[in-house]
Image (cartoon, rainbow, N blue to C red):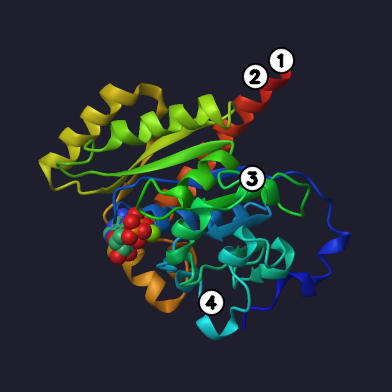
């Protein structure tokens, strides 16, 4: 049973403004939610306190972490529209150290409602850029460059971009990169691409290798060294309401996400050292 996280005596935990990451790509089915769930789990496994925010009306991150609709009283929708506080909407997951702000179907109407809302691009930023008892907050974005995704990009420090290793991988990516640049110019000067993640890599398929080479040519060092293989365990795990890292820790998919978390933490250390030196 997922209990409200506020029932855990979190008040005793030290507060800090968390590092905020969005997992975004307007293309559908590229591995955003799988990445958000397993990256969040891997970070909590190494002792980080992590909050996952499910900003997609499909609610795949919510169900993938075993949260049932009946347990959801308030959601990311209510947080966006000021109808509930963030702390009241947070639910505990089965993963120690990992909490979630669940999605709800109301998010599908949020696009239209946001158009006329006050500070419509900053609503998520306003609630997330405050001290809380998390080291990381990870936002799972919907497959569009809508006002919801825009809210995520305005709120976060950096974006993790999953790219499926298939023929059309790079298609539409320039649109995402331009959107990130626009957000940087107009709303969030600190925004950066944290990294590009190659997903669903199939070793037996030449095309996967060719796409990976192409992506590395375009994005250079921004592409994570870790590549996520196509692995059935990653697609089975959500139906059990578990991250693959819990469902089958030794599977190639789970191992890859554990490596990714290590690589991300390493980049985080380099970024923070550089910021301190500046
Ligand atoms: N590396 C992988 N190997 C095998 N299956 C995968 C892998 N990554 C994701 N999948 C499966 O592919 C499908 C799409 O993945 P996922 O839901 O993570 O993508 P998404 O980008 O969040 O999709 P959407 O755009 O609809 O939100 C899911 O069924 C998922 O279980
Ligand atoms: Mg998704």
Residues under numbered marks 1 and 2 in contact, where contact means CB atoms less than 8 Å apart: yes
Residues under numbered marks 3 and 2 in contact, where contact means CB atoms less than 8 Å apart: no
Q: Nearer the viewer, residue 273 or 177?
A: 177
Query: Where residue 76 sits in the image (x, y, percent)?
Result: 58, 63
Nearer to us of marks 1 and 4 is 4
Q: Quadrant of the N terminus?
A: bottom right
Numbered disc 2: secondary structure: helix
Q: Is residue 71 above or below residue 15?
A: below
Numbered disc 4: secondary structure: loop
Q: Which residue is mark 1?
A: 277
Classify residue 169 by image quadrant. Answer: top left
Which label's residue is closer to the chain start, 3 or 4? 4
Q: Residues within 10 Å of mark 4 (few under 14, many from 20)?
A: many
Q: What residue is rendered at 56% in x and 39% in y? A: 154
How many angstroms separate mark 3 from mark 4 (CA)? 25 Å
Ligand 2 contact, mark 3 (Cβ < 8 Å)? no
Q: Quadrant of ligand 2?
A: bottom left
Q: Which residue is mark 4?
A: 67
Q: Which residue is mark 3?
A: 125
């Amino acid at each position: 049973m997922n209990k409200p996280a506020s029932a855990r005596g979190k008040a005793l935990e030290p507060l800090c403004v968390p590092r905020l990451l969005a997992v975004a790509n307007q293309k559908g089915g590229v591995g955003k939610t799988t990445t958000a769930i397993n990256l969040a789990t891997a970070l909590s496994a190494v002792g980080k306190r992590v909050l996952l925010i499910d900003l997609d009306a499909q609610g795949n991150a919510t169900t993938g972490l075993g949260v049932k609709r009946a347990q959801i009283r308030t959601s990311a929708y209510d947080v966006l529209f000021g109808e509930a506080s963030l702390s009241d909407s947070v639910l505990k997951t089965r993963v120690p150290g990992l909490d979630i702000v669940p999605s709800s179907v109301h998010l599908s109407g949020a696009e239209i409602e946001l158009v006329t809302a006050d500070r419509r691009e900053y609503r998520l930023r306003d609630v997330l850029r405050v001290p809380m008892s998390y080291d990381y907050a990870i936002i799972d974005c919907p497959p569009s460059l809508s006002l919801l995704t825009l809210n995520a990009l305005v709120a976060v420090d950096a974006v993790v971009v999953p790219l499926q290793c298939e023929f059309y991988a790079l298609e539409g990516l320039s649109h995402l990169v331009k959107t990130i640049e626009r957000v940087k110019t107009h709303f969030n000067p600190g925004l950066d691409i944290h990294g590009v993640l190659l997903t669903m890599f199939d070793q037996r398929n030449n095309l996967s290798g060719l796409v990976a080479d192409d992506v590395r040519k375009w994005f250079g060092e921004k592409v994570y060294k870790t590549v996520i293989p196509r692995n059935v365990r990653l697609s089975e795990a959500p139906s059990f309401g578990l991250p693959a890292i819990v469902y089958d820790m030794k599977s190639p998919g789970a191992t890859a996400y554990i490596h990714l978390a290590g690589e991300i933490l390493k980049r985080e250390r380099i970024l923070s050292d550089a910021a301190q030196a500046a």
